[in-house]
């Protein structure tokens, strides 16, 4: 990788929103750099060979500016020869001069210096790419967190809107029937029903499920002796009553006449 590419690798992620594809591309670049670092370390490892016995450059026949491919050019035969001679290796820190200060004759100095330089550059590139990956992942996670919070808030607002809708959109509950007569002393009279009361709720019957007076009659038949919650509109005011359908001296269980309202 050239110095220009190294500088580009060290630049910060684009200002645009990070995507999963961006992170995958960064990881691919990271793996490429790691492979090149390994190849250059292999070059250093190959420097164990004795120059008098074998020259790696001559055996492999490659130019000095292609050390990224050196790992693929070290054939098993060369490796076996290196093991036979068991020469000292030259890693990143071993001196390239002997104890008297002269250049070592057992290694390819040009090759070692080039490999060391490539490794340093690639390690810098690797560090820059890893920083980009980290920043991209932070941006991606932060964006996902913001999206989750926004979705949660929208869902909550939608639920509140649905809850408010029936009450705000329709206003006060509408009546579906009216009381047009009441017998004195009847259960209806005792409960406090009055003529012209408009019935909004009668037990489980309301304006949404009311179809006919048979709905009220069915509730009354099944609630004999049991209190029913009755809601009425009376001259613009809402009243809550407790009506107990009971047998009394008159007809029926209520002692009142109820007629449906025209809708």
Image: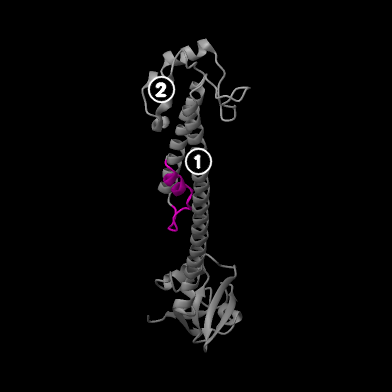
Query: Marks 2 and 1: CB-CB under 8 Å?
Result: no
Which quadrant of the structure image shows residue 243? bottom right
In the rendered image, the quadrant that contains the C terminus is: bottom left
Q: Residues within 10 Å of mark 2 (few under 14, many from 20)?
A: some
Instruction: Tell me if residue 246 can be seen.
Output: no
Q: Is residue 123 above or below residue 43?
A: below
Q: Residue furthest bottom?
A: 235
In the drawing, what numbered circle is on residue 57? 2
What residue would you read off at disc 1? Answer: 126
Say how the picture is coloured: one colour
Give the distance between the C-alpha atoms of the residues marked 2 and 1, in whole angstroms: 27 Å
Is 5 inside the magenta-drawn segment?
yes
Q: Residue furthest right?
A: 99
Q: Name the residue at 53% across, 73% down.
A: 253
Measured as percent of width and height from the top left, residue 194 is found at: 54, 85
Q: Name the residue at 43% across, 71% down.
A: 208
Foreground: 185 or 156? 156
Is 247 inside the magenta-drawn segment?
no
Instruction: Tell me if residue 262 can be seen.
Output: yes
Which quadrant of the structure image shows residue 212? bottom left
Foreground: 167 or 115? 115
Badge 2 marks a residue whose secondary structure is helix
Measured as percent of width and height from the top left, residue 45 is found at: 51, 23
Work out whether mark 2 precedes mark 1 in sequence or the reverse, and give the earlier one: 2
Q: Name the residue at 37% across, 26% down.
A: 62
In the rendered image, the quadrant that contains the N terminus is: top left
Measured as percent of width and height from the top left, residue 72 is found at: 40, 24
Foreground: 262 or 146? 146
Measured as percent of width and height from the top left, residue 201 is found at: 51, 74
Highlighted magenta segment, given as a residue range:
2-18
In the drawing, what numbered circle is on residue 53? none
């Amino acid at each position: 990788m050239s110095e220009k590419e190294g500088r580009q690798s060290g630049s910060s992620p684009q200002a645009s929103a990070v995507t999963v594809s961006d992170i995958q591309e960064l990881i691919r670049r990271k793996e490429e750099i790691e492979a090149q670092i390994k190849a250059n370390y292999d070059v250093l490892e190959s420097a164990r060979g004795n120059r008098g016995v074998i020259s790696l450059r001559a055996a492999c026949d490659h130019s000095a500016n292609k050390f990224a491919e050196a790992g693929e050019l070290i054939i098993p035969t060369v490796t076996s020869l290196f093991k036979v001679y068991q020469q000292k290796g030259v890693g990143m820190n071993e001196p390239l001069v002997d104890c008297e200060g002269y250049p070592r004759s057992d290694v390819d100095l040009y090759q070692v210096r080039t490999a060391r330089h490539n490794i340093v550059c690639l390690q810098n590139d690797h560090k820059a790419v890893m920083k980009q990956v980290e920043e991209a992942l932070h941006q991606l996670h932060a964006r996902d967190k913001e999206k989750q919070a926004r979705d949660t808030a929208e869902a909550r607002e939608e639920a509140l809107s649905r809850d408010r809708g029936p009450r705000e959109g329709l206003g006060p509950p509408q009546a579906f029937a009216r009381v047009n007569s009441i017998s004195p002393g009847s259960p209806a009279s005792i409960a406090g029903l009055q003529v012209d009361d408009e019935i909004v709720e009668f037990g489980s019957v309301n304006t949404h499920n009311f179809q006919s007076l048979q709905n009220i009659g069915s509730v009354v038949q099944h609630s004999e002796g049991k209190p029913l919650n009755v809601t009425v509109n009376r001259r613009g005011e809402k009243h809550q009553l407790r009506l107990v359908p009971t047998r009394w001296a008159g007809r029926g269980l209520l002692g009142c006449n109820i007629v449906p309202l025209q809708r």
